[in-house]
Amino acid sequence: MTGPLRVVVADDQALVRTGFTMILAADGIDVVGEAADGAEAVEAVRRTRPDVVLMDIRMPEVDGLEATRRILTGTPGEPRVIILTTFDLDHFVYAALSAGASGFLLKDVTPEHLVAAVRMVRDGDALLAPAITRRLVERYACRDPDTSALHRDLAALTPREAEVLRLLAQGLSNAELAARLRLSEATVKTHVARILAKLGLRDRVQAVVVAYETGLVSPGARRNADGG
C-alpha cells in the first residue's frame, strides 16, 4: 500500500477520541477525522475516504451499528470498520460483524495492539480469530430480529470450497485446514480467497457468519468434529 494509513475515529467520549488519535499519530498513522456520533461518522467517512474506521458501538442519535451499515453500503471504496466496545460478547458486536465490520477491539486495548489492529485490517486481514467469531455466532445467530443477516447462495462454491468454508467456520487456522485436508497452506489460501470472491465477502469474519447463518455449520460443530 502506498501513502499513509488514514483513519477516522468515532466515539462519543472526547477523551477516547483524543487518546486514540494521539496513539495512532505517534506511530505515523494519519487520523483524518473524528466523530461524536454515528451520523458524524458517516459524514466524516464520506468526506475523508479513510482506510479504516474505529467505530464505537454505543453512541447517541445514530449508533455505531447503523453507521457501519450506512458506511459499508454507501461509501465508494468501502473502508474497513473496527468496532470499539467495552463488552467482548455484546450482541451489538455480532450484529456489526454481520453488517460487514472486520472485527472488534475492547476500549482498554493496549497502544501496541491498537496500532497493530489498524494496520492488520487495512491490509485486508480480519481482526478476529475464527473461533471467537464462532462463539459470537453460536450465541447470537438467529436470535436477534434486528440482525442484518448476510444471505449468500453457497451453490456457487465447489464441494472442496464448501468443505474449506465449513472447517474455517469451526475455527481452524490455515495451517490446521492444510493438515486436515492434506493440502499446502498456499492451496488453502487460494481456496479461501475464491470463497470470499464468490460470496462477495470482505474477510474471514464474514465467511464464518455466513457459514452459520446459511446452516452450513451448526453450533457445537467443532466439539462434535473433535469428538469432545
Image: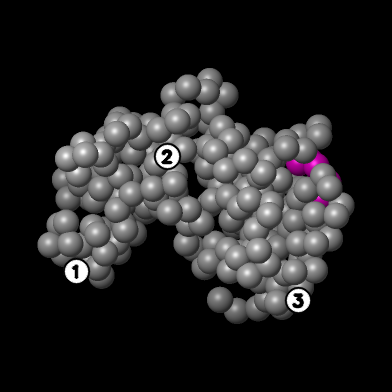
Between the C-alphas of marks 1 and 3, the distance is 39 Å
Decide if residue 201 is in sight here: no
Classify residue 226 as left or right of residue 50. left
Q: Earlier in the sequence, mark 2 or mark 3?
A: 3
Residue 170 belongs to the span the image colors magenta: no
Relative image position of residue 139 (x, y in whole percent): 45, 30
126 w.r.t. 206: above or below: below
| Residue range (magenta) | 35-40
Which label belongs to residue 135? 2
Between the C-alphas of marks 1 and 2, the distance is 27 Å
Label 2 or label 3, whichever lies nearer to me, is: 2
**Colour treatment of the image:** one colour
Which label belongs to residue 184? 1
The residue that label 3 is drawn on is 26
Looking at this view, is 75 or 84 the one in front? 84
Asked if disc 1 and disc 2 are in contact, CB closer than 8 Å, the reply is no
**Residue that appears at 73% across and 37% down:** 58
Relative image position of residue 13 (x, y in whole percent): 84, 48
Mark 1 residue type: Ser
